[in-house]
Image: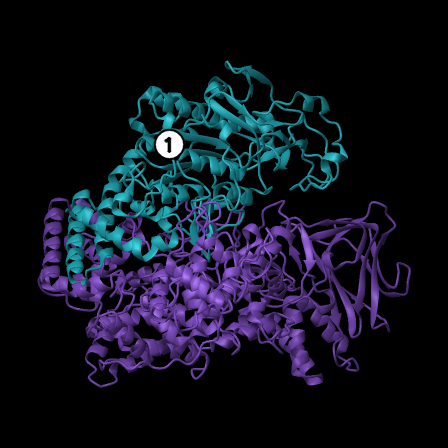
Chain colours: A cyan, B purple
C-alpha cells in the first residue's frame, strides 16, 4: 500500500472513531471525512463495504455540483422578471394604507408612492416568458431555465438575509450551504478545494466571509476564496527564489523526517500530514492552472465577455465553468452592488440596474450555454438570485423623496432562476399579486430553496444533521420543503 | 452511585452494552438504576419521538409527571408498580408492527425489555442525570501497581489496569520541558531554559519548573486564549459594516486575571456582575465587558431592539454553555428535547440579562471612559472633593456616573410621547422633537435629584424652550432651559427644584416658530452632590459638567444595569419569535437546578449561585476545560455539553475529585489545578505507543501514554517567531496588525484599513492580533482559530493542505525561517554542525542521526542548486550569501516538521 492510501486509511480509522461517528447522526461522517484526506469521488460510491456508511446519497442525485450566482444587495424583481402592468398604472399614486399596516420596512417611512416598472418587458421563447429589456442575453435561454417568482425570506437587512440564504440562520456562525455540501459529499478533485468562492463588483457581500464560512463544521469545509490579484489562493505560490525544484527537495526532506517521526510515535496524524503536504504541492500547480483563463479560446472568452486577470463577473463565470470541469463541488459567485435605493444614479432601478445587468447578463447566459454545449449542465445546478426582493413602492427614506427611483428591501416576493441539475426547463413557477408585492400561488421560502438544492444533490435535508451544542443542526433549521414541482 | 458508575462506564459510552452487563450481574436482586440502566434505553430508542418537544401520542419521557399521565388514546404509558397496566410495556412487547415500539425501528432486545419492566415494577422512579447531582467525595482507588505522583494517577491507573494496559515511562527531559512550556505558557523553551532544566539534578527540578512557568507572565497570555474563545472576544462588531470595537482592555483584564490567579469564583462574579458589586472598582467594571463581546449590527435599517434581544439571547446561551456546559439554546423555541428544562425557564434566565442599558446602537453605550491626563486630573479633584465631604461609596458612585454618563432614560422608558419621531434603526438612535412635542415619564424618583441632563442636537437657528413640569403639562415647573443651535450633540444640564420625592415628569418642547425642531438621545438624572453648603459647590458642579462632556481616550463597552423603577419586563417569546410575546416570567434559574426554590433578583445572584456549593456543574465543567487543553480530550469528551446527549465521563470519580478540590481546598485557584495536573505522572508520560496499547486503546482514552496534540493557531505562530528570535515580549494594549496579504479587508460601508504594524508590534504574540469578525487573520483561521462570533468551547483540530501552504509560504513564516537561518549562518563548523544547531533551535534537542542526515542532504542539494542559480538565491535570502539561501530552505523545512507543530 502506498503512503497516500496508508494515510487515508489510517485517517479514516482514526477520525471515524474519535469524532465523526459521534458527531454525525446519519453516519454521513464516513463520506464526509473522505474530503479530509484527499478528496475523491465518493459521489455515488457506497461505502457500506467497510462498514462506515451506506446512507449517502440518500437517493439518486440529479446534480453533482452547484454554481450559485449571488447578486449581493438584492436586485429588483420588478425590473427584471416579474412583469406587473398594473403597477405601471399606479405609478406615482400614494400607497394604500392596507399595504403598509403591520409591515416593517428598512427605510420607508410614512406613506410612500407606488413606483411602476422602470424597464420594458417583452415575451421570449416558446414559453412566451416575460423578460425585461435589461436582460437581452438572458431572454435567449428562458426555455432552458426555471424562474421562481415567489421566493420569500424572513430578513429585510442585507447581512442577516444573506446569512439566512446561505447558512439557514440570520445570525453569524452557522455553516454555509457550500460547507454543508462539501462536508457531505467531499470533492471530486484531489488537487483543488471542494468549495470555492469568487467575488466581483468591488466588495465582499454584506455578511462578509461568514456566508462561505464553515460555522461549527471543521474549518476545512469553509469556502476557499479565489483572489483576482496576488495569489489566487492565499500562499499558494512559493516564496521568491524558491523554485519548484527546491520546493520538491524541501518537501522530500520534510516528509522523510515525518515518516521517521511516524515510525517512532505511530501517530496517524503524522501520516495524514505527509499526504496534506503532497496535496499542497499539487495545488501549487493545479490552482494557478485552473484560474488561468488566458488559455481559453478567444471565442469562448468573447462568449462570456471575459478578460483574463479582471475582477469581473464575466471572468468569474468563465472560471466557474473551468472549476466545474475540474470537479469542484460547490462554486459560489458574489456580485456586489444591487442595492438600488435611489440615493444616487448607480443605485437607481432605471439606470443603475441596467449598469449591473450589463455586467452579468451576457456572462450568466454564456455560462448556461457553455455548460450545455459541454454536456455539463445536466449534472450541474446553476442558481441565480439575491437575498430578498424590492418593494413596489418607491423608497422615501426619512419620509423624503429620493433623488432617483429606488425601491426598499422587501421580504415577501423576489425572483430567482435555476438551470440544469435536474431542474425543469422553461418553467415559470409561482405567481405574485398584481403589483408584485406578495406571492399568491406556490410561494417558495428560502428554506425550501435550500431543501431543493440539497435534494438535487441526493441529500435529504431533514436527515443531514450535525451535532453541535447538544443538538442536531441542519441547513434548513426545522423548516423547508422540497419544491417538487420544479424538478424535472 | 459511584460504585455503579465505576462498573458500568469502564467500557465507556456504549450504553446498551453497559446496561446488558449490569443486567446480567444485578437485575434479579438489585434495584434498577435509572441513570445507568434505564436512561440509556430511553435516550437511544424513545426520546426522539417521546421527548420534551415531540410527545407523539401525548406521551413524553422527560418529565415523570408527563410520562405517568394519560396519553391521547386514554391509556397510561407508565403505571408505577404495574408493568402489566403500563401501555409502554404492552407496546414494546407487541407483535403488531403498527403498535410495536420503537415504531418502524429495531425492536428492543429482551434484556432491555426486562430492565424497563423491572423498573416500572419497582415504582418507575426517575433519577436526575449524573451531571445535575452534586459531586460526592470519591474513594481514592487502590491499585496493584505502585505508580504515580498524586491522586490523579490513582484514578487513571485504575482504568489503565482494568483495560489491560500499562502506564508509559516518563517522557525524556527534553520532551517534557518542551511539553510543559508549551502547555503552561504557550511558548517553547529557549535553549538556555532547556539547559536549566536538563542540568538541574535536584529532586524537585520539575516542580520548580512548573512553579516558575505558572509565575511567568506568558502563562496568562497563553491561557487567556482559551477564555477569549469562550467570551467571543473580537476587535470588531460583526455583520455588514463590521466596524471596530474598542474592547481590548477586557482582553488585558483576562490576561491579568490568569496571571494574578484570581480565584475562579471571583473571576466569574466580576465578569457577570462586576457592576453590581458594592463600590465596584474600574477593573471590575472592565470585567463586565465579557458580555459586551456580543455582535452589534450597524447595518442601516436594522431594528435595534431585534439585535439587542439577539445579544441578550447570546448572553444567556453563552453563560449556560461556559459555566454549566448546558445547552439551553434550543429552549428558546420549545421545551428541551432531552433535558428537563421548560421553555418559560429559558426566559427566566433571559430576565437576568434583559435589564442592561445597552441596545445595539453604533455608540456602543454604555462605555467606561478612560480620560486623557488633563481630564483625569479634573476627575481626581472632583473625587477628592466628594470624599472629603462624604464617603468612598459616594465617590465611587460619582466616578461611575462621570465615566459612563449612564444610566440614561431612553425612548423605551418614556411612558407617553406626543409629536415625537423616534429614529431607532441602526445607525440612528434619537428622537426628533418639534414645537409642542412632549414626553411623559411616570413615577420618577426625584429624591436627591438635582439636575437633569439632556444630550441635544439642533440645526435650527430658532430658539426652542424646554419646560420640565410635574403632574401634567402646565403643572408645577421644576426646571427650564432654552435650546439654541448646536454643532452636533451637546450636553445641557438643567437645574431642577422640587419637593416631590416621586412624580410623573413632563418634558414640553416649545418654540415661537412652528417649524422648529431638535433631536435628543435620552435623559440623564443627576443626583445631588454632597457639600452644598460649601463655597466651592457651584465650581465643582461646573467641573462635573465639563468632565461629563469630554470624550474618553479609550472607551470600553461595559454592563450598566437599568434603574429598578425602569427595569424591563421579560416575557416568553412564543416559538422563539421575539415579536410574539407570551406570558411574563419571573427572573430565575431552571427548576432542575433550584430544588430549594431559592430567590434570585439579578445577575449578581446568578453569578454567586454559579460558584456556590449548591451548583453541581461549575467545578466539573471548569476542570474538564483545563483537562481538555492539556490532554486533547476532556474527561467528558463533549466539553460543551454535560447534558443527556453529552458524553459520559471516562473517569467520573477523577472528575469529581478534581472539581471538589478546585472549589474546595484549592479555593478556585486555576494555578493549583494546573499544577496538580502537570505534576501527575499521567501528564509526564512519554507519548510513544506500543503496538499492544495501540490495539487495546487506539484513541488513548485511558491515558496509558501522553497524547500528541497539534499546537493551536496562536502557538504555531508564536513558536515560529520565538525560535527565530523575532517574538516581541510586549504585553497589553490595542490589538496589532502583523503582515497579511493585500486585499483581505474589503468590507463595504467601512473604510477602515489593515495598516501593517511596525517595529515589534509586527511580532507580537498571536493573542494580540486584531480579530475582525467578518475577515479574521488568515493564517490563524486556517489553523482552526475562532472568528469569535459565538462562544466556542473547543476548536476542532484539522489537518489540511491549506495549513501546509501557510507554514511553507506565508511571508510571515518565511521571514521567521530566514531570520533563523541568519543565526545559523554564524555557527562555526560543517553542515552537520549547522543542521544540529538549527534543529536544536527549533526542537530544543539534538536530532536523531537519520533526521540530521536528511537535513544535511537537503543543505547539500540546495547549495548545489543555488550555485547554478545565484539570482534565485539572492531573491530568497535577500542577500548575496549563497549559504544563507540554503540555510533558509532548511529552516523553512524544520518549521514544517510534524514534530514542530505538535506537542509530544
How far across and how far down the image is residue B295, in percent?
A: 54, 55
Position of B235 with respect to B109 (left or right) is right
Dot 1, how many residues are within 10 Å of its Cα: few (below 14), some (14-19), or many (20+)?
A: many
Q: Quadrant of residue B258?
A: bottom left
Count the marks: how many?
1
Q: Is residue B893 above or below residue A46?
A: below
Position of A44 with respect to B773 (left or right) is left
Picture quarter with the N terminus of chain B: bottom left
Q: Is residue B800 above or below residue B344?
A: above
The answer to whether residue B871 shows anywhere in this view is yes
For image coordinates 40% across by 68% down, the residue present is B625
How far across and how far down the image is residue A76, in percent?
A: 58, 30
Q: Secondary structure at mark 1?
A: helix
Position of B272 with respect to A217 (left or right) is right
Picture quarter with the C terminus of chain B: bottom left
Which residue appears farthest toward the top when viewing the image? A126
The answer to whether residue A137 shows anywhere in this view is no
Residue at the disc numbered 1: A320
Amino acid at each position: 500500500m502506498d503512503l497516500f492510501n496508508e494515510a487515508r486509511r489510517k485517517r479514516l480509522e482514526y477520525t471515524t472513531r474519535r469524532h465523526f461517528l459521534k458527531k454525525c447522526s446519519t453516519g454521513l461522517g464516513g463520506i464526509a471525512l473522505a474530503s479530509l484526506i484527499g478528496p475523491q469521488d465518493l459521489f455515488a460510491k457506497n461505502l457500506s463495504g467497510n462498514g462506515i456508511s451506506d446512507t449517502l446519497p440518500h437517493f439518486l442525485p440529479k446534480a453533482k455540483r452547484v454554481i450559485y450566482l449571488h447578486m449581493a444587495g438584492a436586485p429588483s424583481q420588478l425590473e427584471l422578471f416579474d412583469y406587473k402592468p398594473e403597477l405601471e398604472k399606479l405609478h406615482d399614486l400614494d400607497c394604500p394604507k392596507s399595504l403598509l399596516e403591520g409591515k416593517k420596512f428598512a427605510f420607508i417611512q410614512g406613506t410612500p408612492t407606488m413606483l411602476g416598472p422602470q424597464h420594458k418587458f417583452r415575451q421570449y421563447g416558446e414559453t412566451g416568458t416575460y423578460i425585461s429589456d435589461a436582460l437581452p442575453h438572458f431572454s435567449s435561454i428562458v426555455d432552458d431555465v426555471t424562474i421562481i417568482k415567489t421566493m420569500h425570506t424572513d430578513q429585510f437587512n442585507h447581512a442577516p438575509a444573506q446569512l439566512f440564504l446561505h447558512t439557514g440562520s440570520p445570525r453569524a456562525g452557522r455553516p454555509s450551504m457550500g460547507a454543508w455540501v462539501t462536508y457531505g459529499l467531499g470533492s471530486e478533485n484531489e488537487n483543488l478545494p471542494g468549495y470555492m468562492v469568487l467575488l466581483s463588483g468591488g466588495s465582499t457581500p454584506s455578511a462578509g466571509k461568514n456566508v462561505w464560512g464553515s460555522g461549527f463544521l471543521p474549518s476545512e469545509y469553509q469556502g476557499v476564496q479565489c483572489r483576482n490579484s496576488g495569489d489566487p489562493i492565499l500562499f499558494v505560490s512559493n516564496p521568491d527564489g524558491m523554485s519548484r525544484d527546491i520546493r520538491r527537495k524541501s518537501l522530500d526532506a520534510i516528509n522523510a523526517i515525518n515518516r521517521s517521526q511516524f515510525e517512532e510515535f505511530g501517530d496517524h496524524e503524522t501520516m495524514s500530514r505527509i499526504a496534506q503536504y503532497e496535496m499542497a504541492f499539487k495545488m501549487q500547480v493545479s490552482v494557478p492552472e485552473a484560474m488561468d483563463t488566458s488559455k481559453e479560446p478567444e471565442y469562448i472568452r468573447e462568449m462570456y465577455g471575459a478578460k483574463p486577470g479582471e475582477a469581473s463577473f464575466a471572468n468569474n463565470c468563465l472560471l466557474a465553468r473551468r472549476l466545474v470541469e475540474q470537479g469542484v463541488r460547490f462554486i459560489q459567485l458574489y456580485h456586489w452592488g444591487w442595492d438600488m435605493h435611489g440615493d444616487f444614479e448607480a443605485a437607481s432601478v432605471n439606470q443603475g440596474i441596467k449598469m449591473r445587468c450589463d455586467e452579468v447578463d451576457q456572462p450568466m447566459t454564456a455560462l448556461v450555454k457553455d455548460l450545455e454545449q459541454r454536456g455539463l449542465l445536466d449534472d450541474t445546478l446553476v442558481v441565480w438570485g439575491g437575498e430578498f426582493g424590492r418593494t413596489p413602492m418607491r423608497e422615501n427614506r426619512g419620509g423624503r423623496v429620493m433623488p432617483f427611483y429606488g425601491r426598499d428591501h422587501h421580504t415577501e416576493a423576489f425572483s430567482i432562476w435555476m438551470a440544469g441539475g435536474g431542474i425543469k426547463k422553461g418553467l415559470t413557477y409561482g405567481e405574485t399579486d398584481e403589483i408584485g408585492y406578495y406571492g399568491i400561488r406556490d410561494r417558495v421560502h428560502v428554506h425550501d430553496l435550500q431543501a431543493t438544492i440539497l435534494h438535487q444533490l441526493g441529500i435529504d435535508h431533514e436527515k443531514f444533521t450535525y451535532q453541535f451544542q447538544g443538538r442536531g443542526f441542519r441547513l434548513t433549521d426545522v423548516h423547508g420543503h422540497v419544491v417538487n414541482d420544479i424538478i424535472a | 452511585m459511584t460504585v455503579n458508575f465505576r462498573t458500568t462506564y469502564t467500557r465507556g459510552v456504549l450504553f446498551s452494552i453497559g446496561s446488558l452487563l449490569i443486567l446480567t450481574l444485578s437485575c434479579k436482586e438489585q434495584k434498577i438504576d435509572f441513570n445507568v440502566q434505564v436512561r440509556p434505553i430511553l435516550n437511544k430508542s424513545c426520546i426522539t419521538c417521546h421527548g420534551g418537544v415531540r410527545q407523539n401520542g401525548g406521551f413524553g419521557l422527560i418529565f415523570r409527571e408527563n410520562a405517568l399521565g394519560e396519553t391521547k388514546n386514554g391509556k397510561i404509558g407508565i403505571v408505577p408498580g404495574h408493568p402489566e397496566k403500563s401501555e409502554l410495556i404492552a407496546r414494546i412487547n407487541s407483535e403488531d408492527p403498527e403498535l410495536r415500539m420503537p415504531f418502524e425501528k429495531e425492536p428492543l432486545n429482551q434484556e432491555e425489555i426486562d430492565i424497563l419492566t423491572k423498573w416500572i415494577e419497582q415504582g418507575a422512579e426517575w433519577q436526575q442525570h449524573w451531571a445535575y447531582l452534586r459531586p460526592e467525595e470519591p474513594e481514592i482507588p487502590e491499585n496493584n501497581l505502585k505508580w504515580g505522583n498524586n491522586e490523579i494517577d490513582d484514578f487513571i491507573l485504575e482504568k489503565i489496569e482494568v483495560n489491560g494496559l500499562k502506564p508509559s515511562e516518563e517522557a525524556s527531559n527534553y520532551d517534557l520541558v518542551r511539553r510543559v512550556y508549551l502547555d503552561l505558557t504557550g511558548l517553547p523553551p529557549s535553549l538556555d531554559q532547556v539547559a536549566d532544566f536538563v542540568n538541574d539534578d535536584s529532586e524537585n527540578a520539575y516542580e520548580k519548573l512548573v512553579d516558575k512557568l505558572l509565575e511567568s507572565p506568558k502563562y496568562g497570555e497563553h491561557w487567556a486564549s482559551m477564555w477569549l474563545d469562550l467570551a467571543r472576544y473580537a476587535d470588531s462588531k460583526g455583520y455588514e459594516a463590521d466596524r471596530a470595537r474598542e474592547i481590548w482592555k477586557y482582553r488585558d483584564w483576562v490576561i491579568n486575571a490568569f496571571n494574578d490567579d484570581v480565584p475562579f469564583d471571583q473571576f466569574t462574579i466580576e465578569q457577570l456582575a462586576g457592576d453590581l458589586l458594592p463600590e465596584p472598582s474600574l477593573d471590575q467594571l472592565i470585567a463586565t465587558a465579557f458580555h459586551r463581546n456580543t455582535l452589534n449590527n450597524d447595518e442601516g435599517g436594522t431594528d435595534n431592539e431585534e439585535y439587542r434581544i439577539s445579544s441578550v439571547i447570546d448572553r444567556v446561551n453563552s453563560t449556560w454553555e461556559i459555566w454549566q456546559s448546558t445547552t439551553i439554546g434550543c429552549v428558546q423555541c420549545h421545551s428541551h428535547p432531552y433535558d428537563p428544562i421548560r421553555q418559560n425557564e429559558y426566559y427566566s434566565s433571559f430576565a437576568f440579562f434583559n435589564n442592561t442599558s445597552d441596545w445595539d446602537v453604533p455608540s456602543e453605550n454604555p462605555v467606561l471612559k478612560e480620560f486623557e491626563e488633563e481630564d483625569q486630573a479634573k476627575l481626581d479633584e472632583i473625587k477628592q472633593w466628594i470624599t472629603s465631604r462624604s464617603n468612598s461609596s459616594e465617590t465611587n458612585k460619582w466616578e461611575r456616573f462621570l465615566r459612563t454618563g449612564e444610566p440614561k432614560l431612553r425612548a423605551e422608558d418614556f411612558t407617553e410621547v406626543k409629536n415625537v419621531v423616534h429614529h431607532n434603526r441602526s445607525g440612528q438612535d434619537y428622537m426628533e422633537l418639534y414645537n409642542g412635542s412632549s414626553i411623559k415619564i411616570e413615577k420618577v424618583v426625584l429624591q436627591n435629584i438635582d439636575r437633569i441632563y439632556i444630550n441635544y442636537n439642533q440645526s435650527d437657528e430658532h430658539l426652542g424652550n424646554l419646560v420640565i413640569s410635574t403632574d401634567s403639562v402646565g403643572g408645577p415647573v421644576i426646571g427650564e432651559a432654552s435650546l439654541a443651535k448646536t454643532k452636533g450633540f451637546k450636553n445641557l444640564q438643567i437645574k431642577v427644584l422640587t419637593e416631590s420625592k416621586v412624580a410623573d415628569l413632563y418634558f414640553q418642547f416649545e418654540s415661537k416658530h412652528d417649524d422648529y425642531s431638535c433631536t435628543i438621545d435620552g435623559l440623564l438624572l443627576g443626583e445631588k452632590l454632597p457639600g452644598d453648603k460649601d463655597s466651592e459647590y457651584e465650581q465643582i458642579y461646573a467641573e462635573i459638567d465639563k468632565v461629563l462632556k469630554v470624550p474618553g481616550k479609550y472607551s470600553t463597552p461595559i454592563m450598566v444595569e437599568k434603574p429598578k423603577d425602569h427595569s424591563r419586563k421579560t416575557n416568553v417569546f412564543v416559538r422563539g419569535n421575539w415579536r410574539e410575546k407570551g406570558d411574563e416570567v419571573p427572573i430565575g434559574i431552571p427548576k432542575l437546578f433550584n430544588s430549594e426554590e431559592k430567590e434570585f433578583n439579578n445577575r449578581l445572584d446568578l453569578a454567586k449561585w454559579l460558584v456556590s456549593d449548591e451548583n453541581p456543574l461549575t467545578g466539573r465543567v471548569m476542570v474538564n476545560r483545563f483537562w481538555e487543553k492539556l490532554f486533547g480530550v476532556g474527561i467528558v469528551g463533549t466539553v460543551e455539553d454535560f447534558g443527556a446527549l453529552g458524553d459520559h465521563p471516562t473517569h467520573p470519580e477523577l472528575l469529581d475529585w478534581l472539581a471538589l478540590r478546585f472549589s474546595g481546598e484549592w479555593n478556585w485557584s486555576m494555578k493549583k489545578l494546573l499544577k496538580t495536573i502537570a505534576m501527575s505522572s499521567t501528564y509526564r508520560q512519554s507519548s510513544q505507543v506500543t503496538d499492544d496499547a495501540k490495539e487495546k486503546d487506539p484513541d488513548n482514552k485511558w491515558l496509558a501514554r501522553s497524547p500528541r496534540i497539534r499546537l493551536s493557531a496562536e502557538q504555531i505562530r508564536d513558536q515560529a517567531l520565538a525560535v527565530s528570535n523575532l517574538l516581541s515580549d510586549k504585553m497589553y494594549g490595542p490589538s496589532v496588525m502583523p503582515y497579511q496579504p493585500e486585499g483581505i479587508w474589503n468590507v463595504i460601508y467601512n473604510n477602515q484599513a489593515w495598516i501593517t504594524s511596525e517595529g515589534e508590534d509586527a511580532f507580537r504574540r498571536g493573542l494580540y492580533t486584531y480579530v475582525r469578525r467578518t475577515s479574521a487573520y488568515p493564517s490563524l483561521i486556517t489553523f482552526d482559530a475562532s472568528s469569535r462570533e459565538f462562544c466556542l468551547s473547543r476548536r476542532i483540530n484539522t489537518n489540511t493542505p491549506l495549513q501546509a501552504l501557510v507554514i511553507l509560504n506565508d511571508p510571515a513564516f518565511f521571514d521567521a525561517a530566514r531570520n533563523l537561518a541568519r543565526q545559523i549562518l554564524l555557527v562555526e563548523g560543517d553542515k552537520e554542525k549547522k543542521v544540529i544547531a538549527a534543529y536544536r533551535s527549533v526542537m530544543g534537542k539534538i536530532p536523531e542521526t537519520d533526521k540530521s542526515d536528511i537535513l544535511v542532504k537537503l543543505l547539500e542539494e540546495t547549495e548545489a542548486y543555488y550555485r547554478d542559480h545565484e539570482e534565485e538565491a539572492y531573491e530568497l535570502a535577500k542577500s548575496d550569501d549563497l549559504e544563507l539561501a540554503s540555510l533558509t530552505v532548511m529552516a523553512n523545512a524544520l518549521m514544517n516538521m510534524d514534530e514542530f507543530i505538535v506537542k509530544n
